[in-house]
Image (cartoon, rainbow, N blue to C red):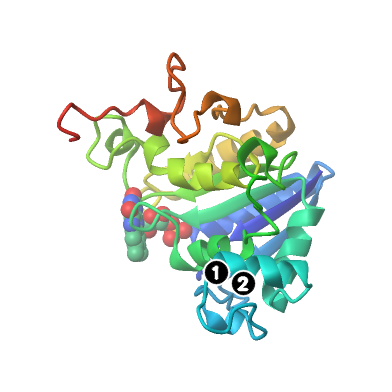
Amino acid sequence: MNIFIVYAHPEPQSFNAAMKDTAAEVLTKAGQKVRVSDLVAMEFKAVSDANDFPRRADPERLVFSVEQRAAFESGLTSPDIAEEHEKIIWADHIIFQFPMWYYGLPAILKGWFDRVLSEGFAHAPPRWFDDGPMAGKRAMLSLTTNGKPSGYAADGRHGAMEVLVWPIHNALRFCGFDVLPPFVAYDVVRGDGERRRAILSAYADRLRGLAGDKPLVFHGLDDYDRDGRLKAGVEPRTAAQRMRLDKDGR
Ligand SMILES: Cc1cc2nc3c(=O)[nH]c(=O)nc-3n(C[C@H](O)[C@H](O)[C@H](O)COP(=O)(O)O)c2cc1C
């Protein structure tokens, strides 16, 4: 398997760095090929702006979907994005390694999603979700938190982890990836070396069994009506879609 690790942390001595290094070591020893994009070290540009499109399809008004697709189709994708595209094409499996920052992705990794998973390359409606261009590739989030697992339970103060990561998972599914359950290293700020070693060891075990992991369930396109809502009689099977508003919409 070809495995691409997209890593977002500025500190080589961080727990995230240790997880990235553990993954590279364990997977390489298991005979897999590994490549890493160290986004901070690469000074990866996080902001999607007009500089990404020096030759504009529409010079009057910047519409990202139009410019991304035109750049991709004419081979004019910005070189830093094209390099990431090449790694994705090479990969069977992508691991995203990052600390949870304000309940989501660090800005540099969000920027990678915005710029690299671009229209034309990663999704090209009506080629999306089950029919997305990334179909057949697998993706997994590997993240760290300061909060304890109890705070990320369904009734926890942070909200359920499966709901918090759902937008990231669904963005990957939108592109066609099969998404594996995340590996969450909770409460990594406190704790001694022994606890950290135990987490890294559990992560190494998880990685050794990666090929056998079953993807998370997402509804197929056939489950939705023309408005993009689940058809009558289709029970919601994902965390976010199981959430119900009351009759006042609250
Ligand atoms: C800007 C910022 C936002 C953060 N937001 C969260 C958060 O939403 N939830 C949480 O549990 N921890 C949060 N943290 C704590 C980090 O997740 C924690 O420091 C990190 O996972 C530790 O891993 P590291 O040692 O590799 O940095 C935040 C930290 C920073 C700097």
Residue at image location 71% in from the left, 46% down from the top: 134
Ligand 1 quadrant assignment: bottom left
- Quarter holding the N terminus is top right
Q: Residue 38 is drawn in which quadrant?
A: bottom right
In the image: residue 208, left or right of residue 187: right
Residue 57 spot, x, y in % from top left: 64, 77
Check disc 2 and give the amino acid type: Glu
Q: Tell me if I can see residue 132 in this picture.
A: yes
Residue 72 spot, x, y in % from top left: 72, 68
> Which element is circle 1 on?
helix
Residue at image location 70% in from the left, 72% down from the top: 71
249 is higher (above) or lower (below) than 133: above
> Which element is circle 2 on?
helix
125 is higher (above) or lower (below) than 238: below
Residue 238 spot, x, y in % from top left: 45, 28
Mark on residue 6? none
Q: Residues at badges 1 and 2 in contact (C-beta under 8 Å)? A: yes
208 is higher (above) or lower (below) than 40: above
Mark on residue 67? 2
Disc 2 residue lies near ligand 1 with CB under 8 A: no
Q: Tell me if I can see residue 190 in this picture.
A: no
66 is higher (above) or lower (below) than 92: below
Mark on residue 64? 1
Q: Nearer the viewer, residue 174 or 180?
A: 174
Q: Nearer the viewer, residue 202 or 56?
A: 56
Residue 150 spot, x, y in % from top left: 29, 33
- Quarter holding the C terminus is top left
Neighbourhood count class around disc 1 (C-alpha, 10 Å): few under 14, some 14–19, many 20 upward: some
Q: Residue furthest right?
A: 31
Residue at image location 32% in from the left, 29% down from the top: 243
Check disc 1 and give the amino acid type: Phe
Disc 1 residue lies near ligand 1 with CB under 8 A: no
